[in-house]
Image (spheres, helix red, strand yellow):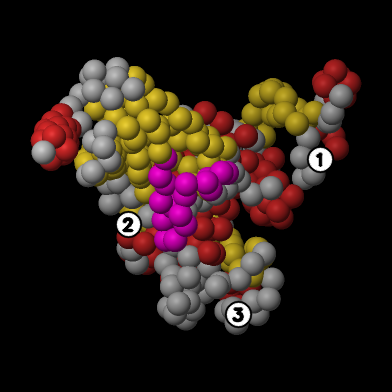
Amino acid sequence: MKLIVFLVLLAILAIAELIFYRRHALDDLTLNVSFSKPVAGFGEVIEVIEVAENNKKLPLPFVILKFESPTSLEFLDMTNSTLSDLVYREDMLTMKPNSRHTRRIKVKCVKRGYYSFVRVNLTTSDILLMEKITRTFDNDAGITILPELVPLPDLRTLLSITFSDIVQRRTLLTDPFSFAGIREYQPWDPMRSINWTATAKAGDFMVNQNASTSTKQVSIFLNLEFYNSKESQALLEKSISLAYSYTYELNSLGIPSQIFTNGKDAITGSTVIDSLASDNSDNIRRGLALARIDISAGVIPFAELVDEFLPSTGANDYIVVISPKYDTTFRPILLNLKRKRPSLLWVWPCYHTTALPEIEPELRSDFMRWEVKGNDR
C-alpha cells in the first residue's frame, strides 16, 4: 500500500513539474543569432554569434539552438551541422538559472550576396525530460558579402584597352604645366612620366599625373540575362566580379565610372544602378550595390536598360558592355549602341573551352574575350 501511495505521489509531482515547465520554461528566455560584422569581403572569415539568456530562477536541463544558414557561408567546423540546400545548425547546452550563453562560430564567406537570419529555433525540456518544449524567435541579422575581386593580372588587358582609348585621347588635351599628383607606375604608363625622386623615396616606380582639360568617364552596362538554355549563373557571377574589380581599379586611378545593370536588388526589387564614382571611397558603396543583386529574381531586358540609361551617359563616354550572352538577339542591340556611342567595348566572359562566336565585322575591333576557369555544371 505504501508503495502505491508513493508511486501516486511521484506521478502527481511529475505531472505538476511537467505542467509548471510547460507554462514557465520559456519565460524570460531570449535567443539571438548575429554576425560579427555587417559587411564582409569575399573569402573573408567572420563569426556567427549565438547568444541565449535564461533570465529566471528556473534551470533548463538542456537547450538546443537551431538555425538555417545558406551554403554561401561555409562553416569551418561542421560539427552539429547538416548540409543540403542549406546548412542546418544545432548546438546543445545546459542553462542554469539567470545564466547567459555565448558561442562564436567561424564561417567563411564563399559567395557574394545578401543573407539574413530571420528566425531561430530553441528547444528545451522539463527536468524529467518527459516532453520537449519549442519556440521560434524572430531574429534580425543580415550580412552583405562583397563580390570577389579579380586579380590585377587578369584585368591588365581590359585596363590597357581602356587606357588606350581614354588616356591617349586625354593626353592631347593634358596641360603639362598642371600637376595633379603622384601614383604608382602601371605597365601602360610612358617612361617619361616617371618621377625619379619619388621613385627613390618609395622604392618603387612612381609617376606624375598631369591635370587634363577634358574629363572622360567609363560607363559600364552589365547584362545579367541568362546566356544558355540551362539558365546557368556561373558566368553571371563572374561578370559581376569583373564589373566590381574593373571599377575598383578605375577608382584607384582616378577615372570616373558608373554602372548600369539589369539585375534587381535582393531587398528593394529595383534595378541596380550605381551613380558616378571616382575614388576609393566609393568602392564599398558600389560593392554593396553589386553584392545585393539577386540573379534568381529575374532581370529587365537589356535593350530596355540601354534605352533608359544611355541618355545618362556622356557623348564622349567610353562604353563598356559586360555580357556573357552573345546570341543573335543580343548583338543587334550592340550594333545599335555602337552607332550612338562609337567609343565602345564588348567584354565577353566565357570558359577556356568555349568556341568563339561569329561576330559582325562592325563589332570585331570592339570585342574582348575574357576567359575564366570552370564550366557550367
Q: Which residues are magenta?
A: 75-91
Give the vertical position of 90 relative to 177 (above or below).
Answer: below
Q: Is 156 part of what is drawn in magenta?
A: no
Q: Badge 2, how many Cα within 10 Å: few under 14, some, many 20+? A: few
* Quarter location, residue 212: top right
Among the two numbered marks 1 and 2 on one chain, the one whose residue lies closer to the N terminus: 1
Among the two numbered marks 3 and 2 on one chain, the one whose residue lies closer to the N terminus: 2
Q: Is 82 part of what is drawn in magenta?
A: yes
Give the vertical position of 287 relative to 326 (above or below).
Answer: above
Q: Nearer the viewer, residue 230 or 249?
A: 230
Q: Looking at the picture, how far across and down is residue 27, in whole percent?
A: 18, 27
Instruction: Please state which of the two labelled residues, at mark 3 or mark 2, is closer to the viewer.
Output: 3
CB within 8 Å, label 1 to label 2: no
Q: Looking at the picture, how far across and down is residue 346, in whole percent?
A: 56, 64
Residue for badge 1:
190
Amino acid found under the numbered disc labelled 1: Pro
Among the two numbered marks 1 and 3 on one chain, the one whose residue lies closer to the N terminus: 1
Q: Where's the C terminus, which quadrant?
A: bottom right
Residue for badge 3:
357
Q: Is residue 217 visible?
A: no
Instruction: Please state which of the two labelled residues, at mark 1 or mark 3, is closer to the viewer.
Output: 3
The residue sitting at 51% across, 58% down in the picture is 237
Residue for badge 2:
308
